[in-house]
Amino acid sequence: EFGANVNTENKDGWTVVQEAVATGDPDLVQTVLEWRDYQRYSSRVGGVPELLQKLKEAPDFYVEMKWEFTSWVPLVSRMCPSDTYKVYKQGSKVRIDTTLLGFEHNKWHRGNTSFIFQGQDDEATIMEVDHETQQVFIEQMRVLSAANLQVLQPSPESVTARLTAPITTTYLDTDKISFERNKSGIWGWRQDKSEVINGQCCKVFGASNVELVTKTRSEHLSEEDKAKFKSAKTPLQSFLGIAEVEEKAPTNVPPEEYSHAGNPCHISAEEYFNGDVQLGTRDIGRPKEMTTRIQKFKATLWLSEDYPLSLPEQIMPIVDLMAISSSHFAKLKNFIQMQLPSGFPVKIEIPLFHVLNARITFGNIFGLEQSVEGVDRIEENGKTHCIVNDSCFIPPASYTLLGCETRRQVSLEEEDDMLQYAIQQSLLQTGQDE
């Protein structure tokens, strides 16, 4: 309400939403979620027209991005989804088709949806086309007034789900990462490894010293909820070999006092916001109960020197566009923004969570492998160029046109929470089966 950035993180990597959940206060969680989504939406309104203008100058294209999620825990692997994003680009217009809609009642819901972005100068229109219900939600991207905040209001069920589950943050520590060419062949005859991916000859690189850090907090949970989640993870950790460090913040404050107080250590605002003041173990909120897991992974890259798309000019604006509302694309963006070896990353395999990897593969470029309606190709000077027809960006005339107020806004923004919840439910089920 007073202009604070709800999307910021503190020095330990925790978001405002996560810190709100840690207080155990449902009203605070609901307020923070509303303002977070409002600020994300506002930044999306400002960022999308700029990205579409950047794309306008790049050659038109069609490409498919296949996301596969893999895990060595069988139930997790079975529960986590895969999807193929189909990307059409013509001038400052972008269409992205997806089939993954959400997670509810321990099941992923699939559908058939197209998101169509159309840029005009410093404005943009987005259409969400539901091909199953034959409905089109049209939204002129403009900043919402605070009076319209109720359209972003989280459901009571989603607030309760947050307050009864551990708070988890996962990130890649890339400080020590290094890339090396993978080798093939027998000892003494080893050579640089190459593989053909979707018709493209690719050099294979391994990224070593990739550390996946997972922090989990539980100070807001009841003893019953703590026991439920702890019983699921104990047998699995011995199986997975996950090293875990448990930390409890030291405090002299009795639980009956800090369970209802937001500042049990009596830190003043002047102390809290003064970078020169060393708070030591003192902090606001409940004393933290946190576990930290650090796992070393190897990421793998398949790079092509002759791919017909440009990573910075054509693909990065699309990744930026999706990263505004998709945490998976945000993680992909962070990875490929590193100093990668030369070439186009036709295929990338990176860790997302402590039991889950993502494998992203680019394919069916320009519809060369499988024809796509509305996508044509021409050969010119030995090069293949893509023509994307206007029809790709026009919903069928028989569909019903609706305003965006008839559906919940920013529907893609909870996918990270949904996937994390799916993993937790899978681990609980695995723990029970053992």
Image (cartoon, rainbow, N blue to C red):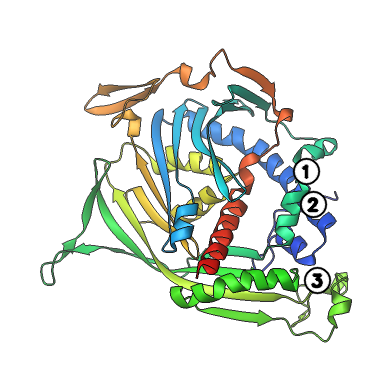
For image coordinates 80% across by 71% down, the residue present is 285
Whether residue 16 appears in this view of the structure is no
Question: Left or right: 351 with respect to 301?
Answer: right
Disc with the residue nearer the chain's start (2 vs 1) = 2
Question: Left or right: 422 with respect to 300?
Answer: right
Question: Left or right: 25 with respect to 39?
Answer: right
Pinpoint residue 307: horizontal percent, then vertical percent: 30, 40
Give how far apart the Cα atoms at labels 2 and 1 are.
Answer: 7 Å
Q: Name the residue nearer the viewer: 270 or 108.
A: 108
For image coordinates 45% across by 29% down, the residue present is 88
Compared to residue 157, the image places residue 384 above or below, namely: above
Q: Which residue is mark 1?
A: 153
Instruction: Give me the disc on residue 30.
Output: 2
Whether label 2 touches label 1, CB < 8 Å: yes
Whether residue 23 appears in this view of the structure is yes
Q: Amino acid at mark 2?
A: Gln
